[in-house]
Image (cartoon, helix red, strand yellow):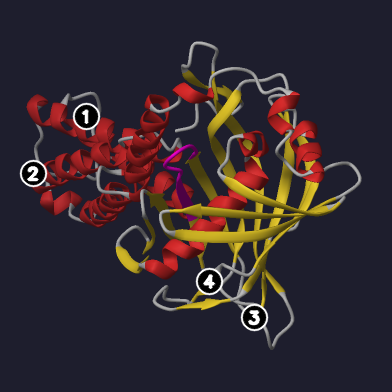
Amino acid sequence: MIRWTVGLLVIVHGLIHLMGAVKGFGWADVDTLHEPLGPSLGVAWLAAAALVTAAGVMLLARARGWWAVAAGGAVCSQVVITTSWGDAAAGTAGNVLLALAALYGFRSHGPSSFRARFRDLAAATEQAVRAAADGAAGIVGEDDLSRLPAPVAGYVRASGAVGRPHVVGFRAAISGRIRSGADQPWMPWTGRQVNTYGAAPSRVLYMDATMKGIPADVLHAYIGPAATMRVRVASLLNLIDAHGPEMDQAETVTLLNDLCVLAPAALVDAPIEWTPIDDHHARATFANAGHAATAVLSFDDQHELVDFVSDDRLRSSADGRTFTPQRWSTPIRDYRSFGGRRLGALGTGRWHPDDEPAFDYLEFHVDAIDYLEVAADGMVAPHGAASQMP
């Protein structure tokens, strides 16, 4: 709503500049403009109209670089307004709005934004996994499932992994809602995520959330030995910068969870120590960069993963400065096919406090996903519905 309101106001502001062009070129009398305008100023007013209107249209269309056009439009508009200050001074208010929108656009979409950082990190991790994918070439066969406990093998088989290339990562478009506590309001969000696997697994997630009507940018990055979570309000104010051993431990559990929930085909190559429990349960232990995570996986009679429970994740405080060990689970449902690979599209993040009832703090939906597959020649390429995600 804010984007549409601002965008439409900017477009109206831009079209008003056409009055200066009309008078400057002598096409018609404009009673509201009393000061003289010649053809040269008519060109300037027309240019301002074009830039400001284009900025509004680009904002509504979410076009990249709209903030740069908006900044140029604000400057050009203010220059021509000064030439007819007595008639057009009120237009300065529109340029203040346009300049603020350009500033927000630069911070939220420009080279220093979390969006840009996400794209850079995602590209770097994909390049790294491509360079290290030699050993995973070939097609997944039944022999690859032999080291897995029976319920895990059934899950991988049902996911459509057998007979297809090995998976070394994925790109996903995800949406949902999140809250900081059982009594806190839900915040809607959309996200882009890239995970890679192998000798040095990584996880990069960008979330575009809304907190009480105010936009917030969230960037998770787990690359190499360290994990971070950063939050900016309105793309301007740094609210959270979580890092350190506790954050690394928490993200190690999340990395294992993503592997089990979103990339079941990659389980055949994952460095996981499996412990069979029964026909519907297995224990997974995963280590990365000096941190270990253990979880119990639950499967139903259709060989679908329905829950993931771990006591190794730490719950962060609202400001991201402190972490408390707490049981964490992710019930999964709504299995469907994504490019021939089957996985649960709906999931829930659930905390289990010792002295309070368990509560859901996260709901997510997989909107699109593609997998980085290793072809017979050892080359890694994406396959699926999200290949063209920004």
Q: Is residue 322 left or right of residue 68?
A: right
User: Camera-side residue: 131 or 95?
Assistant: 131
Numbered disc 1: secondary structure:
helix
Q: CA distance from mark 3 to mark 4?
A: 20 Å
- Mark 3 vs mark 2, foreground winner is 3
The residue sitting at 55% across, 49% down in the picture is: 190
Query: CB of mark 3 within 8 Å of CB of mark 2?
Result: no
Q: CA distance from mark 3 to mark 1?
A: 54 Å
Start-end of magenta stretch: 196-208
Report which residue position mark 1 lands on.
46
Report which residue position mark 4 lands on.
314
- Mark 2 vs mark 4, foreground winner is 4
Mark 3 Cα-neighbour bin, 10 Å: few <14, some 14–19, many ≥20: few
Query: CB of mark 2 within 8 Å of CB of mark 1?
Result: no
Relative to 113, does residue 291 appear above or below in the rendering?
A: below
Q: Is residue 47 left or right of residue 141?
A: left
